[in-house]
Image: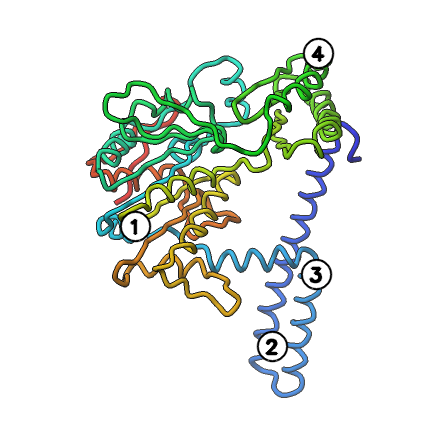
Amino acid sequence: VSNSPSGLWTKNVMRDLRDVTLATQAEMLQKMKKSITRIDGSIKGKKGHSSRTSLSKAQAKMEGVGSSQAKLSREIEMAFAPLDTLAVLSAYNNASNRVIFMDFNGTLVLKEPTGKYLKREMLGTVGNKPPTEVIEALKNLCADKRNTVYVVSGDTQRSIEDAVGHIKGLGLASGQGGTIAHPLKSGETSRSWKTFDLGVDWDAVKRIALPVLSKYTARTNGSFVKLTPTSIGWSYYSCDPEWGSMQASHLVVELKQTLLGAFDVRFVTLKGVVEIVPRKLNKGLVVTNVLKSTNQGNPVDFVLCVGDDISDEKMFTSVFSFIAQKSEIDFHSDNYGNIDKKSAEMDVENPPSSSMHAFTVAVGKKTSHASYFVDSASDVASLLVHMGGIKSRTMSWDDNCHDIAIFD
């Protein structure tokens, strides 16, 4: 099955069947709990103990499939909290050296479908832009000398510059954190992009990978190669689905044979695209670099980091790593040096003197290293508008979307 063109479809069907089975088992368990609860009210002594024992055995049996996932879900449910906007605003207003990191697609703008993204890149047109109110809020935030604001995107340099590059004082990062452009200084009119040293001779990787990609491009009608400063991509989104998927699986095998061992790279497979990227490439590079440089002199006392997908997880963990390295903060660590990220973020409502407030926020409730979540990009926009002091009751999103009211 794994080698056939329809292998992915088969796996998805099996996954859906498993999900339905787990849901049915959970429903049966709930009914059994209610039944035994009624019985326990009238049965005492040995019989009551027997009913509870039966329930425990049934529960253990039903949780046998996917028990680790169930336990993880319960832990996430307990640790993951909805973002308290008032707490963020209170911490922000009381801070003197603030750093803000924002993902772009799915955070500052509504999530763009993968197909639209790939077609947009192929046509070379510009993607969505944040609402006007968010742009104004970012301008106000960047104009405050106490703030350092960066947009960290997986998009290209051109696309991110076209969307928000005109905002003075705003730092940018593209290519999943591989390149960074610090805020424009006085008198500068164009941004200077710098590429992180990721320990890979990228020119040598291209010399080996491009002939292989060209071979698969020639045999797969509609595919094309996409190059960025920190990645080599092969898009088959416009190809026949089964043929393109089969060619992509063969391509990854051949690339692994030619590149792994010689170069420290990894392969990212998304819907319609295969990418070769340095293994060290992640958005956490930007977070670490900016926090260290901003922490010189006046210590950072407020961090807000928001993202919506798996590529943003390294941003969250990098924030916690930075907190752990600040010697003046009580980390509430155990005897083994493990740090409780909730304790590291400090009590916002009753902060100690000289405390640091860090808010790592995932857009959408999901498995995440973040401590808080919001439901959608509209909630992120509302938060930024409040922080930026913009007075507005509606949000003018992209032309394809209806206005969304801002919550109070």
- Image location of residue 90, percent across then percent down: 24, 52
- Answer with left or right where residue 345 lies relative to residue 217: left
Residue 23 visible to an observer of this rendering: yes
- Quarter of the picture containing the N terminus is top right
Q: Nearer the viewer, residue 392 or 175?
A: 175
- Answer with left or right where residue 223 lies relative to residue 403: right
Disc 3: CA contacts within 10 A as few (<14), some (14-19) or many (>=20): few
Q: Which mark is residue 218?
A: 4
Query: Mark 3 sits on what residue?
Result: 64
Considering only order in the chain, which callout, 4 or 2, is on the residue closer to the N terminus?
A: 2
Residues marked 3 and 4 touching at CB (< 8 Å): no
- Image location of residue 353, percent across then percent down: 25, 61
Disc 1: CA contacts within 10 A as few (<14), some (14-19) or many (>=20): some
Q: Which mark is residue 39?
A: 2
> Where 169 sits versus 220, above or below?
below
Q: Nearer the viewer, residue 204 or 234?
A: 204
